DNA sequence: CATGTCTGCCCC
DNA sequence: ATTCTGC
DNA sequence: GCAGAATGGGCAGACATG
């Protein structure tokens, strides 16, 4: 009510045009895209005459993650001052990101190194740890301070990193000692909370799998080769069950990559990350380049589980999708009960032409209310309903348990199954809705992966 | 007070 | 996260 | 190829409802 009152008085005092922006601000509909890189361009343009002079600013930003610092330093000390901005403890470095390929055989072609390191890829949370004596700070992938979230990792870094100062890059995962398997990502996310952090940390201990070293004993390591950084990392880590370097192999060819990938998948991991071992395999803060290439099972469509799902609803598009649908609600066929149960929404993978065509394609199936044979939880209820008619091929990474989607719904646990990272592949116009993937098939896929 | 639903976002 | 598009 | 903007699942916690 306080919010409402305040907002009402603001709206009352505003001009019509201001009102529009106030509403957009409040509802998160602001569509002015100015990312960090655009701001750096603007800084270069304003103070150095041209945006071609962005690189030194960008470098300082990549190692400081503080665009305000870069701007202030540029104003007060010029480019020389910006160039002198050092890697600093408790100031996060923008994480190096991975490239992707659509065929695994592209990896050796693109990586530019005869020796390739292949690391396990974990389905957890990216964590950058800064150790400054006993003072440890943890940063998430988007560089927010998550130190309080992982008291266990803080303790491990404090005790088992054998260097006075260090910056580590790695992944927090939930590893189950008893079953020797990793918990799903969802389990780790239960630790993303405000209350009862300690209790849940005991219940779901985090393991820190470290794969890089960016700074040690007062020295930045960004411009050392990956093999050197890795060797120094291993020397600095006093490994135990809750902190260790990422498992990996070194190989020279595609077969080696494929073999290791298969063993990773068999062990329930998400995939692999291949890393160049070349002389110039530096840590490229903030960059997504070909020194690091990831491979997951859904990248090559042949290996992936593709589902044929029925469209039962759609949501209104926003922003550049205003005027068409932004996503569609997809369901599987429950043969036993002769109903359709939802598995995912889907708004990715459509070209602009596909999107523009969506209303025409769906108009014939439009329904006033939720069709009788469609089962949806309130949280998944769409803006528009459709009678089951259109069948679409959907690609996703994996099946997860879901409180939102009704596929194979368990009324006791109030949970169904959902598809993670769904995207549009193509229409299956030749299929009837009853020929869609069944909820039983999806359940079988889920069990096969969960139980090995 | 218990339960249902919605929102924000340290995540992927 | 994935994907598409304008530059 | 980059940068931006669409979109997904899902969690805890806030808020609404009865």
Image (cartoon, coloured by chain):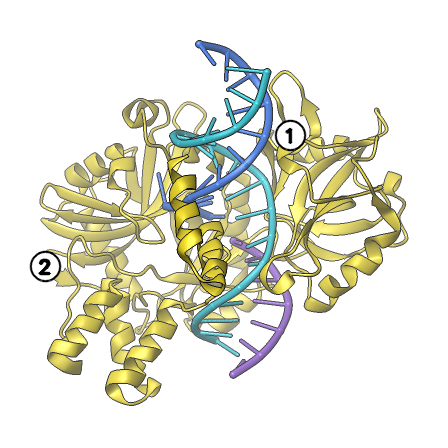
Chain colours: A yellow, B blue, C purple, D cyan
Instruction: Name the residue at the front extreme.
Output: A13
A232 versus D16 height, above or below: below
Nearest the eye: A254 or A294: A294
* Residue occupying the point 68% across, 36% down: A445
CA gap, disc 1 to disc 2? Answer: 49 Å
* Residue occupying the point 17% across, 71% down: A72
Is A128 situated left or right of A447 in this image? Answer: left
Residue A184 appearing in the image: no
The quarter in which the C terminus of chain A is drawn is: top right
Q: Chain of mark 1?
A: A
Q: Position of residue A266 (x, y in %)?
A: 55, 40
Q: Position of residue A166 (x, y in %)?
A: 17, 52
Is A240 situated left or right of A339 in this image? Answer: left
Badges 1 and 2, same chain = yes
Residue beneath label 2, please?
A: A218
Q: Position of residue A322 (x, y in %)?
A: 65, 61
Nearest the eye: A397 or A147: A147
- Disc nearer the start of the sequence (1/2): 2
Mark 2 residue element:
loop
Residue A391 appearing in the image: yes
Residue beneath label 1, please?
A: A447
* Residue occupying the point 37% across, 32% down: A191
A229 versus A176 height, above or below: below
Mark 1 residue element:
helix
Nearest the eye: A129 or A81: A81
A155 versus A89 height, above or below: above
The quarter in which the N terminus of chain A is drawn is: top left
Q: Residues within 10 Å of mark 1 (few under 14, many from 20)?
A: few
- Name the mark on residue A360: none
Q: Chain of mark 2?
A: A
A22 versus A181 height, above or below: below
Q: Position of residue A303 (x, y in %)?
A: 67, 51
């Amino acid at each position: 009510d306080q919010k409402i009152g305040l907002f009402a008085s603001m709206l009352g005092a505003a001009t019509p045009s201001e009102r529009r922006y106030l509403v957009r601000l409040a509802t998160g509909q602001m569509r002015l895209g100015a990312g960090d890189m655009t701001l750096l361009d603007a800084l270069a343009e304003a103070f150095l005459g041209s945006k071609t002079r962005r690189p030194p600013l960008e470098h300082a930003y990549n190692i400081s993650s503080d665009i305000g610092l870069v701007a202030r330093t540029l104003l007060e000390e010029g480019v020389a001052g910006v160039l002198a901005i050092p890697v600093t403890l408790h100031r996060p470095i923008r994480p190096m990101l991975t490239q992707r390929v659509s065929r695994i055989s592209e990896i050796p072609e693109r990586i530019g190194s005869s020796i390739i390191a292949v690391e396990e890829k974990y389905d957890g949370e990216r964590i950058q740890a800064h150790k400054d004596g006993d003072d440890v700070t943890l940063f998430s992938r988007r560089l927010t301070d998550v130190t309080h979230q992982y008291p266990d990792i803080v303790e491990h870094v404090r005790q088992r990193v054998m260097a006075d100062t260090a910056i580590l890059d790695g992944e927090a995962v939930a590893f189950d000692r008893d079953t020797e398997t990793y918990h799903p990502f969802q389990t780790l996310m239960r630790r993303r909370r405000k209350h009862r952090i300690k209790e849940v940390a005991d219940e779901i201990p985090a393991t820190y799998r470290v794969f890089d070293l960016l700074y040690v004993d007062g020295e930045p390591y960004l411009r050392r080769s990956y093999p050197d950084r890795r060797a120094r990392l291993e020397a600095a880590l006093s490994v135990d069950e809750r902190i260790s370097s990422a498992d990996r192999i070194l190989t020279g060819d595609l077969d080696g990559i494929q073999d290791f990938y298969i063993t990773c998948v068999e062990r329930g991991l998400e995939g692999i990350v291949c890393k160049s071992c070349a002389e110039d395999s530096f840590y490229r803060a903030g960059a997504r380049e070909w020194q690091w290439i990831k491979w997951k099972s859904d990248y090559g469509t042949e290996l992936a589980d593709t589902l044929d799902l029925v469209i039962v609803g759609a949501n209104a598009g926003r922003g550049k999708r205003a005027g068409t649908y932004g996503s569609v609600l997809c369901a599987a066929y429950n043969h036993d009960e002769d109903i359709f149960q939802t598995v995912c929404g889907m708004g990715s993978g459509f070209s602009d032409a596909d999107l523009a065509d969506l209303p025409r394609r769906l108009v014939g199936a439009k329904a006033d209310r939720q069709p009788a044979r469609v089962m949806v939880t309130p949280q998944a209820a769409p803006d528009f309903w459709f009678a089951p008619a259109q069948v679409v091929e959907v690609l996703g990474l994996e099946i997860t348990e879901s409180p939102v989607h009704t596929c194979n719904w368990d009324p006791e646990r109030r949970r169904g199954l959902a598809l993670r990272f769904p995207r549009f592949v193509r229409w299956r116009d030749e299929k009837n809705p009853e020929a869609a993937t069944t909820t039983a098939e999806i359940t079988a896929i889920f069990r096969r992966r969960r139980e090995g």
